[in-house]
Image (cartoon, grey):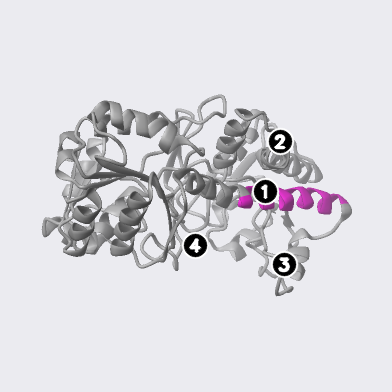
Amino acid sequence: MKIKETLLEKIRNKTLSMGVCGLGYVGLPLAVDKARHGFRTIGFDVQQKKVDMVNAGENYIGDVVDADLRELVSSGMLRATSDFSFVKDVDFIAICVPTPLDAHQQPDISYVMDSAKSIAGYLTWGSVVVLESTTYPGTTEELLKPILEEGSGLKCGTDFYLGFSPERVDPGNLIYKTSNTPKVVGAVGADAAQVIAMVYSAILDGEVHTVSSPAVAEMEKILENTYRNVNIGLMNELAMLCHKMGIDIWEVIDAAKTKPYGFQPFYPGPGLGGHCIPLDPYYLSWKAREYGFHTSMIESSMMINDRMPEYTVERAGKILNREKKALNGSKVLLLGVAYKQDINDYRESPALRVMEEFQHNGSLVDYHDPFVSTCRYKGRQYQGVEKLDEETLRGYDLVVVTTAHSKVDYELVAGVGVPVFDCKNVMKAVQNREYIEVL
């Protein structure tokens, strides 16, 4: 029997064994969905702490339901390990590891390479490997395929299947989770694409869309986030212009979005954060140089967005000057270090760069975040201000809203008489606006 028929039969009768390499924001929710739909699943991670927590039924990801994890672990449907020899016991494994940028803003795909090498030696005939980590077009076939073939002695398309299906995770989204978000699949060969698509159809509730190759799927993911980067860059540039012209950019956007077609609202802010939008355009620009192509519009938006933390502090300095105070020596409180509202994820958060920029100017900076009690940035540990009351607020010369958390008493913040620089327009409903300036 051919690989395809063997795998399709296993999918139909739910005897296909599943694996997930990397138990972070993408991997753990995916592993839970696999197990929840009746497929025995093994999670692989090099961090023993994560492995131990999963095996104890202890959840550490916001998008996973605690009770689901406990039940799946206790029933034996889901377990975790740091021993990659157990790859031999799974039919289908998804690689969900980080793909950050290095110190030179170039793609760091070392986690993908290390995962591929760890998996390769234990692949068996009929295995399926799918990369979910965001990366540049060509990674699956140019990088992953040779590593897997060399390490396993197997031939892609004949002995094992390989594909790319980009993760689509939006932490804190109350509507779209891993399970109900449409999935894109691109694979090496039509048979592999059919099998991989059927696997995702069996474990997810969202539609599965198949494309012609892994490179198309890789580019699709880059497009998703570059689209947002470019449009946010446009709004940030217009925000700077509107400030000079004395026009409220937020009112402009609210007016524009009344148009029922041809316009989608994006909003300015102190910079970009998260695991995708600030990084993905760099992957594309880096790859484009291989073809002698300069992504001018994309790079322009990246420069605008990268400058926003510095611009935020420049504007803050002018607010302090009106109070006859200097940045140097002023006490500043940032409201929020998470990269988006109502989550505890501060990866690539612009608030951390804003904090750094204030410090470079001699300011004394603290932060309050109801979701992040402590954070680490460039080797330094920061402790958040736990209690936000009048006495605490009056101890600062300036308050800067860097994250639009809902669990903050903005009426209190506006009422103590301390200048507030609202970079997220989260205080738009506050009536007392005497001390509020909006980005």
Marks 1 & 2, CB-CB < 8 Å contact:
no
Q: Are marks 4 and 2 in contact (CB under 8 Å)?
A: no
Which secondary structure lies at badge 4? loop
In the picture, the disc for residue 230 is: 1
Q: Which residues are magenta?
A: 227-244
| Numbered label attached to residue 407 | 4
- Mark 3, mark 1: which one is toward the viewer? 3
Q: Which residue shows up at 26% across the image and 41% down it?
A: 160
Q: Secondary structure at mark 2?
A: loop
Of 95 and 257, the residue lying toward us: 95
Q: Magenta segment, principal secondary structure?
A: helix
Q: Left of 126 or right of it: where is 184?
A: right
The image shows a total of numbered marks equal to 4
Q: Is residue 235 magenta?
A: yes
Query: Where does label 3 land, which residue?
Result: 262
Please identify, in this view, whether the residue under mark 3 or under mark 4 is nearer the observer: 3
- What amino acid does circle 2 point to? Leu
